[in-house]
């Protein structure tokens, strides 16, 4: 599989630190960021690379050469005039061939299990797979709106109006693309009759990808792996620290992960019994700061929640999803996020007016059974023996113990919620 790395950016915001170095060659913990990315790709078997270069292209080409010293083969496409972040793809069409290819933004720091992402792409059969993830500032990021199967419905740029509540799902600039998309895109781009290529600059997001929204041909691949823009001095220093302490490499899903599993009602939001109305959802004081600490610790933050209101017919899936969008929006405004939400909709007891019989079963996922944790462990390669379960009932503790978590905490045993948040945060920080 070919991998195209877009490495032509000027890096104007970080130029104060590195005024004469193209952004791909900026040293991070002693090694150019693009070299780190190429080494990671090579280790996963992606060795046929094309670099699209522009600004200070000669320095990049002189440093990497043909790639043989890194165990890869590198071809170059030099943009003599700016073509936008997609214009080069049309000029590379013949070289790309007919198989799907990786298209990666080399301006960001990343370490991702791309074989896992490619498998997802092949299983879903779309033209494009977007790497998406939660971040600490979704309120000023482009957002991807998708259905429960990952089918992209909307693409909201920073300047677009967004709904009151939304999923924290941000496009990270890493893609798997079927080259047929380039052929299809020519139908709505202005073509230069002399060259046969699109005229002027071509914007990847706005002109190539966004038109696929709602067509069933573009999917989002949600992952907690490390992808971070390093375009400002502050972000550069954070990325460098993350490389030095091993955070970047450890987040690759080919490595075992560790997680903090969180119950929802009474642990994240104030307990009001069966929560049926979105207006009754309110974060517990201190929760955002605590989850932010988890985000920074190297643990995944994963919600595992029993929601029998679905089986009882008191809340629809649409209403429950909206409640969770409110949760992720409120956390995001505070700079925190959860990596995934796992829900048990079942309730074994029958006899409720309006109940949904298909959910009235004795399942394996309703806590105190460990099914939700086991599924998360399978999805994210989690080492449960290095993970923590935190909830507000003995059911949560029993589920964590049954799954094999090393620490299981009932916050009700440590005082009221506000004080217990500080307690369980200290547990996470000490592990």
Image: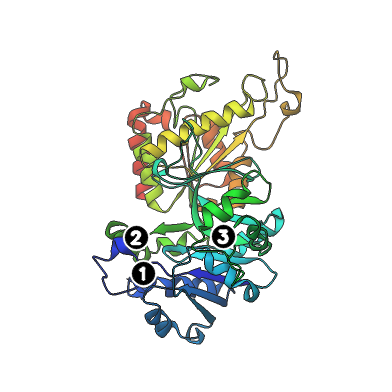
Kindly indicate the quadrant of the structure image that contains residue 17.
bottom left
Kindly indicate the quadrant of the structure image that contains residue 155.
top right
Query: In the rendered structure, are the residues bearing label 2 and label 3 in contact, judged by CB atoms less than 8 Å apart?
Result: no
Q: For residue 358, say whether it is visible.
A: yes
Disc 3 secondary structure class? strand
Label 1 packing within 10 angstroms: few (<14), some (14-19), many (20+) = many
- How many marks the image carries: the answer is 3
Tell me the residue at 50%/63% (across/down): 200
Label placed on residue 23: 1
The residue wearing badge 3 is 175
Q: Quadrant of the N terminus?
A: bottom right
Q: Position of residue 330 (x, y in %)?
A: 41, 33
The residue wearing badge 2 is 231
Disc 1 secondary structure class? helix
- Given residues 422 and 394, the one toward you in this image is 422
- Given residues 25 and 272, the one toward you in this image is 25
**Mark 2 or mark 3, which has the lower sequence index?**
3
Q: Position of residue 258 (x, y in %)?
A: 49, 53
**Mark 3 or mark 1, which has the lower sequence index?**
1
Disc 2 secondary structure class? loop
**Mark 1 or mark 2, which has the lower sequence index?**
1
Cα distance between the residues tagged 3 and 1:
20 Å
Cα distance between the residues tagged 2 and 3:
20 Å
Q: Position of residue 14 (x, y in %)?
A: 29, 63
Query: In the rendered structure, are the residues bearing label 1 and label 2 in contact, judged by CB atoms less than 8 Å apart?
Result: yes
Q: Is residue 125 above or below residue 318?
A: below
């Amino acid at each position: 599989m070919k991998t195209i790395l877009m490495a032509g950016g000027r890096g104007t915001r970080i130029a104060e630190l590195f005024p004469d170095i193209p952004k791909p060659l900026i040293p991070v913990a002693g090694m150019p960021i693009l070299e780190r990315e190429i080494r990671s790709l090579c280790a996963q078997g992606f060795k046929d690379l094309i670099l699209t270069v522009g600004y200070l292209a000669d320095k990049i080409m002189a440093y990497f050469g043909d790639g043989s010293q890194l165990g890869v083969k590198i071809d170059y496409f030099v943009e003599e005039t700016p073509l936008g972040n997609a214009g080069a793809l049309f000029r590379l069409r013949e070289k790309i061939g007919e198989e799907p290819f990786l298209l990666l933004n080399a301006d960001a720091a990343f370490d991702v299990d791309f074989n896992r992402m490619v498998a997802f792409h092949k299983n879903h059969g779309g033209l494009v797979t977007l790497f998406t993830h939660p971040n600490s500032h979704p309120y000023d990021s482009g957002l991807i709106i998708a259905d429960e199967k990952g089918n992209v419905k909307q693409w909201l740029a920073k300047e677009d109006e967004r709904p009151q509540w939304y999923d924290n799902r941000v496009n990270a600039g890493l893609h798997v693309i079927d080259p047929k998309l380039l052929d299809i895109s020519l139908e709505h781009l202005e073509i230069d009759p002399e060259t046969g290529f699109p005229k002027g600059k071509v914007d990847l997001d706005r002109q190539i990808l966004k038109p696929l929204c709602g067509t069933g041909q573009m999917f989002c691949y949600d992952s907690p792996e490390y992808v971070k823009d390093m375009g400002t001095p502050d972000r550069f220093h954070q990325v460098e620290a993350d490389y030095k302490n091993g955070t970047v490499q450890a987040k690759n899903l080919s490595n075992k992960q560790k997680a903090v599993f969180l119950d929802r009602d009474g642990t994240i939001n104030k307990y009001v019994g069966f929560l049926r109305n979105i207006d009754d959802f309110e974060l517990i004081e201190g929760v955002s700061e605590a989850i932010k600490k988890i985000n920074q610790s190297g643990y995944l933050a994963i919600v595992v929640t029993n929601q029998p209101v679905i089986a009882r017919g008191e809340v629809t899936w649409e209403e429950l999803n909206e409640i969770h969008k409110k949760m992720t929006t409120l956390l995001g405004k505070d700079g925190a996020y959860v990596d995934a939400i796992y829900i048990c909709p079942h309730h074994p007891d029958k006899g409720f007016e309006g109940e949904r019989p298909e959910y009235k079963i004795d399942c394996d996922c309703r806590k105190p059974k460990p099914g939700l944790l086991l599924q998360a462990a399978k999805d994210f390669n989690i080492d449960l023996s290095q993970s923590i379960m935190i909830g507000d009932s003995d059911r949560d503790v029993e589920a964590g113990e049954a799954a094999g978590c090393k620490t299981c905490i009932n916050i009700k045993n440590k005082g009221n919620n506000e004080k217990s948040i500080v307690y369980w945060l200290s547990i996470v920080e000490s592990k």
